[in-house]
Amino acid sequence: MREALREAELAAAEGEVPVGAIAVKDGVVCARAHNLVEARHSVSAHAEFEVLRRLEAQLGDWRMTGYTLYVTKEPCMMCTGMLINARFSRIVFGLGDPAGGGCGGAVSLPEMPGILWHPEVTGNVLAEECSRVIRDFFARVRAREKK
């Protein structure tokens, strides 16, 4: 999660909402990314999608069985659906998102009946540090808007 936090800090420095993600297999970081929504002008440029795109390019495959995704904020419903469809084995997140999270916050997509793939989900890992990065970012944004 600390590696994902480093990615979140990079996102903040670039003016992106500070969410970072890494993909790990067999204890090795295989891909890393952070939000690029503003830079790419794309709603799908969330950190989770960026990690998946990088893994797909490396592997030449879309199946991520055996991979764990670490992300600093609970994946939204869009990203959770993508992680399920990509067959990630495990999703580990920091800060929960009760309003929009797809891994137990607003809904729990991995636990829905009928879903063909059920990744293991672990939440609240280094949640305070993950929360601080986002809190500090939006405090800076609000301070700039007041000027």
Image (cartoon, helix red, strand yellow):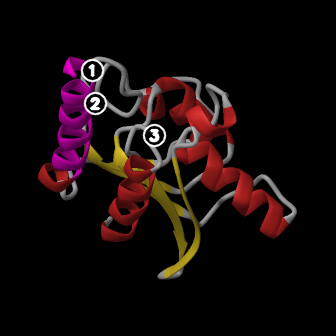
Label 3, secondary structure: give it.
loop
Q: Which residues are magenta?
A: 130-147
**Taking 60 as reference, is 99 above or below it?**
above
Q: Does the residue at mark 1 contact the one at mark 2 (Cβ under 8 Å)?
A: yes
- Please state if 98 lies on the left or on the right of 42 as rendered: left
How many other residues sit within 10 Å of disc 1, few (<14), some (14-19) or many (≥20)?
Answer: few
Magenta span: predominant SS is helix
Q: Secondary structure at mark 1?
A: helix
Is 78 rendered above or below residue 128?
A: above
Comes first in the chain, label 3 or label 1: 3
For the residue labelled by badge 2, is the local secondary structure a helix, a strand or a loop? helix
| Residue identified by numbered label 3 | 16
Which mark, by number, is residue 141?
Answer: 2
Mark 1 lies on residue = 145
Q: Nearer the viewer, residue 129 or 65?
A: 129
Instruction: Please state the horizontal and vertical placement of residue 86, each as a whole percent of the image.
Output: 68, 46
Which comes before the other along the chain, label 3 or label 2?
A: 3
Instruction: Let me know if residue 137 is in the magenta part.
Output: yes
State left or right for residue 106 relative to residue 111. Answer: left
